[in-house]
Amino acid sequence: MRRPFSYSWLTLLLRYWIAWLLLFQVARLLFLVYEVDKVQPIATFQNIFHTFSFGWRQDMSAAVYISALPLLLLWAEATFGLSLFRYARALVHLILVAIVSSLVISDLELFRAWGSKINAMALDLAPSWRETTATALSSPLLLLGGCWLLMAALGYAVWKYTHFARRAVFIPHKRYKVIVNIAAVVAVLALLVIGARGGIQLAPLNPSAAYFSEHGVLNQAALNTAWNFFYSISKRKKDDAPHFMDNATAQRIVDELYDSAANDSIIPVLNTKQPNIILVVMESWTADIVESLGGDAGVSPQFEQLIAEGLLFDNIYSSGDRTYKGIVSVLAAYPAQPNTAIVNYPEKTVHLASITQSLKKIGYGSSFYYGGESEFANIKSFLLNCGFEHITDRRDFGSEAQGIKWGAHDHFVLQRALDDLKRQPQEKPFFCTILTLSSHEPFDVPMETAIAGSDAASMFKNSVFYTDKSIGEWIAKAKEQPWFDNTLFVFVADHGHQLPRGYDNNYTPLRFRIPLLWYGGALQTQWRGKRWHILGSQTDIATTLLQQINPNMQPLKWSKNLLSAQAKEFAFYSFYNGFAWLRPKQYFVLNNDGKKMLMTEPSDSVAASVLEEGKAYMQMLQDDFMHR
């Protein structure tokens, strides 16, 4: 009996991997053709090319994961010489082709209904067989069936023309055979790790890596369908909050918290109807480093000068404990989730209202500046879904601006934003958002040490001092610009920090207290140097800001107007597996798992109405998140 022709296991693996990469390009092209009505008006060569070039990292990652089990079977056959492993490869490949083909074809129609790639929400539809069947029957089944057969045929071609059915052996080599094979195994494993995470960049691969355009269909085309589906499953959390009461009762309680204030109850603090807005979101700027908020003296002296000339909201809390949660809370007024983050789901963030979108409707231009990787934690997809026209990040700065780990230092980023704003047409108002970076661990700053000490608290304060110094110098330059008198600066932290206090737990309210300051020429003179004591959250910035420009502007869903005489005072924040609800002079902190009370104020009891409010808020937020 003639033995089958042999290939080295490495040759077979590389052929197989490359074939899957090509198959993913066909799938992307199929998507573009299927959505031709949306793609054609924007189908420039550059746009189409970018759907492939921005998606290749996900293609590479998906090909690596798909190749993992076949690689194991190749190695087993090369080691033990049993044909059983070759037949197992055939079965595994058949299953993989069926799964990928089904995802690609299902996605073609689901995108038309959802406006996003197939994701974990499809699992929610599976039990609803009536709705699922009805949706399937309303689709062009013959066309989709033909597309599935095309993908399956290409899958068969992958098997046949890569010679993956041939016998696998170790790399043949006359000398040093064992060493060569061991080296090959080590090299392949290293390449698999790099390929799976999409490269050697700091942030592991996420959907943001494929986002490049303000046109959603192009971003969705760039996403690898299979990779995106399993990524969304890995981020899926269905049990962020317990069920405290019936939804109707919970919704009524939440609605009462957000009763729309009458227009005449809004207190105007601006001297212009259409100010330029510069939003500065400051990394880890807890209230504990701001002297005016009871924090340590001497850490942020430049910010203290701005407080003396601005309007300080001195009772504000962050919604979450991470930047990727804070940026959504500030820009889209969406509260943070305990065990996941909505930013991980572009198919959900695409439906969020935002400051950017609201301002765009009345003629504002928009830009976003960040010294780090905008793809980190999937932030870029959120920014593009918000409608930002220009995004500047780490890749736009030279090596001289880069720190050790995260990216460009703050003073370079602030200067870049200022240089760009100098070229901004004066007749068009602008909304510019800057996310600082340098006060993040490892607290790497390009200046001589101002606050001595090698302990974490001292290094943190020293990094804040650097950012504070950079902001002070930047504001001095901004004052020289012709647009300064018509500009409102909004300073707010992305979240609090355990430093410099070193809190024993991750849920104490003090850790979540942050500064919020309005400053600039657009602020009325009588409000400069004033304080506003209302209890509120990051999520309240959006409605407060928008209704200063136009009292009739629609409030964002989870946002109240801090400058309304009718606003109710409350704040919500979440941490891993728990949340807190704050009312004036009382609050509670609850663990979601066992519904265990972790902290209360007063210590003996919290009003039953306050307990009910907080639980209703958490329940309806989770309900909104799951069904968005």
Image (spheres, rainbow, N blue to C red):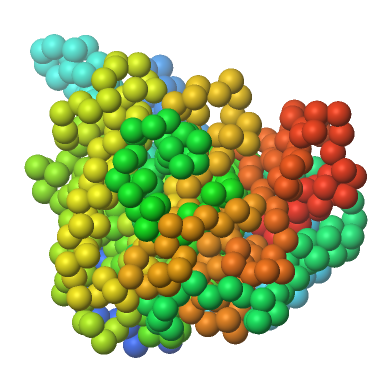
Residue 510 seen from this side: yes
Q: Nearer the viewer, residue 563 or 222?
A: 563
Residue 264: image quadrant is bottom right
User: In which quadrant of the rendered view does residue 521 lie?
Assistant: bottom left
The image shows residue 26 at horizontal and vertical percentages of: 35, 65
Of 516 and 217, which appears nearest the observer?
A: 516
Res. 165 in view: no
**As drawn, is 178 to the left or to the right of 286?**
left
Left-right relation of 395 to 88: left
Could you tell me which quadrant the N terminus lies in? top left
Which quadrant of the figure contains the C terminus? Answer: bottom right
Relative horizontal placement of residue 356, taking residue 442 as reference (left or right): right
The residue under the point 67% across, 76% down is 265
Q: Which residue is drawn at 18% across and 70% down?
A: 481
- How many marks the image carries: the answer is 0
Position of 239 relative to 461 (above/below): below
Give percent across and percent down for residue 118: 55, 61
Vertical order, 515 against 69 (above or below): below
Q: Which residue is drawn at 21% across and 19% down?
A: 183
On the image, the x and y values in percent for residue 166 come to 34, 37
Q: Residue drawn at (53%, 62%), measured in percent from left and top? A: 541
Q: Is residue 585 above or below residue 542?
A: above
| Closer-to-camera residue (111/16) | 111
Q: Where is residue 80 in the image (x, y as percent from the top left)?
A: 40, 17
Viewer-closest of 204 and 66: 204
The relative height of residue 418 versus residue 214 in the rendered view (above or below) is above
